Image (cartoon, grey):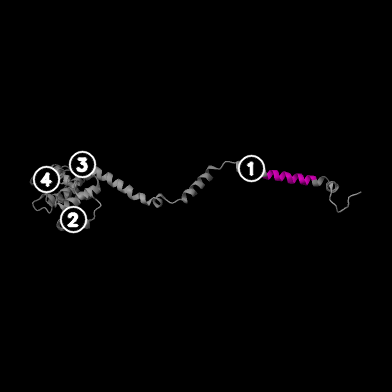
Amino acid sequence: MPTGAGEPGEGSAAERRRRAGPGGAASRGLHLLFTLFGLCRRAARLLRPRAPAAMFTRAVNRLSRKRPPSDIHDSDASPSSSHQGLMSTAKWATSLENLLEDPEGVTRFREFLKKEFSEENVLFWLACEDFKKMEDKKQMQVKAREIYMTFLSNKATSQVNVEGQSRLTEKILEEPHPLMFQKLQEQIFNLMKYDSYSRFLKSDLFLRPGRTEEEEEEDFPDTQTAAKRASRIYNT
């Protein structure tokens, strides 16, 4: 019995292929070809190695999104600073030379000598160090006279206790040379080394550098008041 026109069956599919002719088969073949081509392109993109420039850009972008170490490890900054401070302090204890080579060490030592009313010693030593580095004769003349009038003359405002300053005359000051104060400077250095420096290493300014001025005044109110008066005299 023949199959009805509206009923699906094997004959209907064969009939459609027959009616479509060679053109329909070609169309299906092209469609399949384009599909395969698209799949190949996608596979090639996935397998292709990334370009170095692109990889570098991605890495930079990832790093830029991270917080800097200072934001992440703020708590580490204090221990690091403390470690450096301990290293410097330990170096000061090895010799007076190392202490005077460190600006922070000089500052602490000056504070200590102020309390002992002998700050003029380290100031004289520092002035002589600056003088030895000078090369211009006019500047040396001015500096030599300044050192003499401040630390060595009978009318010096901050006279140091050394032998031989009386041998420095006006004529010598007019013809200065870099080592003209060398022997006097060595006397002061030895005075600090064998006297003030040893006491400094036992002081709170060395052992407990974090103490504030108010805390020190609570321990030694009379001494601190006297030191402040002396400091005003030195700075005027």
Give amino acid for label 2.
Answer: Asp
Residue 135 image offset from top left, x and y in percent:
21, 44
Give amino acid for label 3.
Answer: Ser
Magenta residue check for 27: yes
Q: State which tag comes first along the sequence, 1 or 3.
A: 1
Query: Seen in the image, is 1 located left or right of residue 168?
Result: right
Query: Seen in the image, is 56 located left or right of residue 166?
Result: right
Q: State which tag comes first along the sequence, 2 or 3.
A: 3
Rendered image: mark on residue 172: 4
Rendered image: mark on residue 95: 3
Give amino acid for label 1.
Answer: Ala
Instruction: Look at 13% across and 50% down and name the residue there.
Output: 151
Which of the two residues, 157 or 69, is positioned nearer the viewer here?
69
Query: Seen in the image, is 86 located left or right of residue 16?
Result: left
Looking at the rendering, the stretch of residues picked out in magenta corresponds to 25-38
Of tags 4 and 2, the one toward the viewer is 2
Q: Which residue is mark 1?
A: 43
